Amino acid sequence: MDGNGRWARRRHLPRVAGHRAGVRAIRPVMEACDRAGVHILTLYAFSTENWSRPRHEVAALMQLFGETIDSEVDELDREGVQIRVLGERERLSDRLRDKVASAEERTSRNTRAVLNVAINYGGRGEIVAAVRELASRGMDLTQLDESMLSRALYTAGLPDPDLIIRTAGEMRISNFLLWQAAYAELFVTETLWPEFGETALTEALRSFSSRERKFGTVPEAVPQPLVDALHASRAG
Ligand code: FPP
């Protein structure tokens, strides 16, 4: 959800006003996802690197996370949305950690949609935490395979993302879902997150649906002789 700060600066508002506008942008996007048949949405709200922002901004963001959980959980639960928070929780305040745990517990049996919110999340840290977790369970790590690791990530049980949208024009992954994004399609838009709505989402989905997804393989449409020639030239 990049671009909240720029959105605020353009209006001569404090950055925190941009984050508040960022929160307001979430519901219309969720509703548009629902209409479009997208039932799993992951929002990157706070990265492990974001702690280095000015102290007052970090505090305001933490406050906003708590307030947003408080104000939205009833409605999300009524709508059948399961809330999951991805990230390392130890560094969150006890209060926020409790709110997160209770929102997750309360919505855990909902099946209409999943809303993942990444807070204090970093893709590298997630992989390290997963390996540590497996080691602490006494697993023989020489036997580790991809599916075991996937099942130990914060996203255990969820499919990999099909599409990653980055707002505000940055052409970077920024430590987001590094493992899960292996074959995700990327869409970068100049639109700032507070202005990202149904129109921008539709543009992203349209672009996604025009992509030919290969998952690392050669597409079937390519004639076999061409595939053989390609392999032969690579081997040579
Ligand atoms: C990045 O924009 C945005 C953030 C670091 C915070 C995003 C968080 C929210 C919108 C709150 C969401 C709350 C919940 C509970 C889901 P930036 O500040 O880096 O913008 P800039 O690059 O324009 O400066």
Image (cartoon, helix red, strand yellow):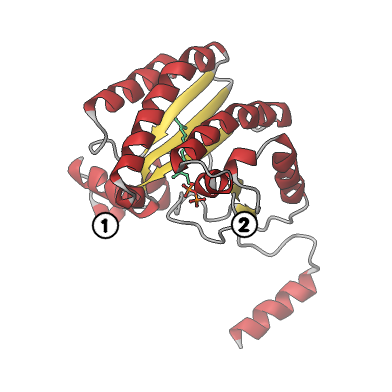
Q: Amino acid at mark 2?
A: Phe
Give the vertical position of 173 relative to 44 (above or below).
Answer: below
- Residue at mark 1: 142
- Whether residue 94 sits left or right of residue 49 in the image: it is left
- Whether residue 37 sits left or right of residue 141 in the image: it is right
Q: Amino acid at mark 1?
A: Thr
Residue 62 appears in which quarter of the rendering? top left
Among the two numbered marks 1 and 2 on one chain, the one whose residue lies closer to the N terminus:
1
Q: CA distance from mark 1 to mark 2?
A: 26 Å
The crowding category of the residue bearing disc 2, from other C-alpha atoms within 10 Å (few below 14, some 14 to 19, many at least 20), is few
Residue 152 appears in which quarter of the rendering? top left
Percent x, y for residue 122? 37, 49
Name the secondary structure under disc 1: helix
- Residue at mark 2: 215
- Residue mark closest to the camera, 1 vs 2: 2
Residue 94 in view in this figure:
yes
